Image (cartoon, rainbow, N blue to C red):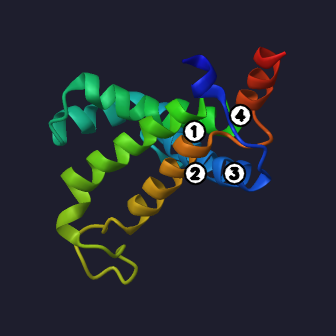
Amino acid sequence: MLKKILSTDGSLATSLIRLTLGVAFFAHGAQKTLGWFGGYGFAGTMGFFTGTMHIPALFAFLAIMAEFLGGLGLIFGALTRIAAFGIAATMLVAIATVHLPFGFFMNWSGTQKGEGFEYHLLVLAMTAFLMIKGAGAVSVDRLLATRTRS
């Protein structure tokens, strides 16, 4: 089982996709956990998710951790498939519960009340790719996979 989770190709392109998605989600996760980049920090985000959005505390916690720890996992290429799955689950829930009513497009012109789901769809494609291919050439997963083989 661990072999399947760690297996990956040796592609630099896969690493590029993983790193790009990892940096983006680490930044979003750092807003929610640490209050960096103008975020509200862990207590503020939990309060918003549970109080305003009425998300059960366990699911709010899992969403925050999926973005923060998932982003870190993707940056380092550690347990990439699991990190990508957590981010994908978070994006699916975000589409279904928040963004679907606003349509496909993001609110580039500022004329609608919320954001569409085009960004989330791109993230879902990237996470699906990473769940299929793995972490790529430059990753902890690849290092561990080659060590387990020898």
Residue 8 as seen in the image, left or right of residue 30:
right
- Mark nearer the N terminus (2 vs 4): 2
Q: Quadrant of the C terminus?
A: top right
Front one among 11 and 121: 11
Residue 104 as seen in the image, left or right of residue 87:
left
Image depth: mark 2 or mark 4 in front: 4
Q: Mark 4 and 1 residues: CB-CB less than 8 Å, in contact?
A: no
| SS under mark 3 | helix
Question: What residue did someone put label 2 on?
Answer: 24
- Mark nearer the N terminus (2 vs 1): 2
| SS under mark 1 | helix
- Mark nearer the N terminus (2 vs 3): 3
Q: Quadrant of the N terminus?
A: top right
User: Which of the labelled discs sits on residue 14, or is there none?
Assistant: 3
User: Which of the labelled discs sits on residue 71, or is there none?
Assistant: 1
- Which amino acid type corresponds to the residue marked 3 in the rendered image? Thr
Question: What residue did someone put label 4 on?
Answer: 76
Q: Which residue appears at 47% of the width and 31% of the height? A: 33
Image depth: mark 3 or mark 1 in front: 3
- Which amino acid type corresponds to the residue marked 4 in the rendered image? Phe
Give how far across and how far down residue 47 sits, in percent.
Answer: 26, 32
Question: Neighbour class for label 4 at 10 Å: few (<14), some, many (≥20)?
Answer: some
Q: Mark 2 and 1 residues: CB-CB less than 8 Å, in contact?
A: yes
